[in-house]
Image (cartoon, helix red, strand yellow):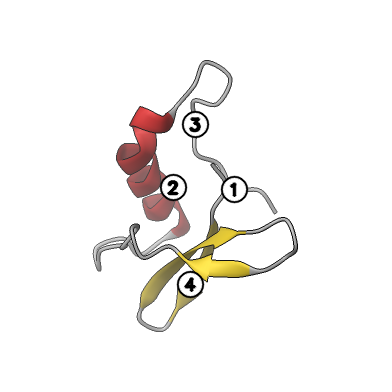
Amino acid sequence: MRLLAEKTGDGWTIYHPSAEGKRRVAHDLVVPEFVVTDDDLVQYLADLCHEAATPTNQEVRWIT
């Protein structure tokens, strides 16, 4: 699963990207206030999405 993360003045906003370059807010992935740093976000999403892991996709990582 690919997600886009944007740091805002209020915390983080997570988006579902589309193949056409559009994005929509991932209302089902609310990031709590204690998630401050990039590393915090990676760990939070890993904890939240571990059940979606597959043998070939077992980790959350940044793609730049």
Residue 51 image position (x, y, % from top left): 34, 29
| Measured Cα–Cα span from mark 4 to mark 2 | 13 Å
Earlier in the chain: of badge 4 and badge 2, it is 4
Residue 27 image position (x, y, % from top left): 36, 65
Give the residue at mark 2: 42
Residue type at mark 1? Trp
Q: Specify whether 40 is left or right of 20.
A: left
Crowd band around label 2 with a 10 angstrom C-alpha radius: few (<14), some (14–19), many (20+): some
Give the residue at mark 1: 62
Label 4: element kind: strand
| Measured Cα–Cα span from mark 2 to mark 3 | 9 Å
Q: Specify whether 42 is left or right of 47.
A: right
Label 2: element kind: helix
Q: Quadrant of residue 9?
A: bottom left
Q: Residue furthest right?
A: 20
Earlier in the chain: of badge 3 and badge 4, it is 4
Label 1: element kind: loop
Residue type at mark 2? Val
Earlier in the chain: of badge 2 and badge 3, it is 2
Q: Quadrant of residue 37?
A: bottom left
Earlier in the chain: of badge 4 and badge 1, it is 4
Q: Quadrant of residue 61?
A: top right
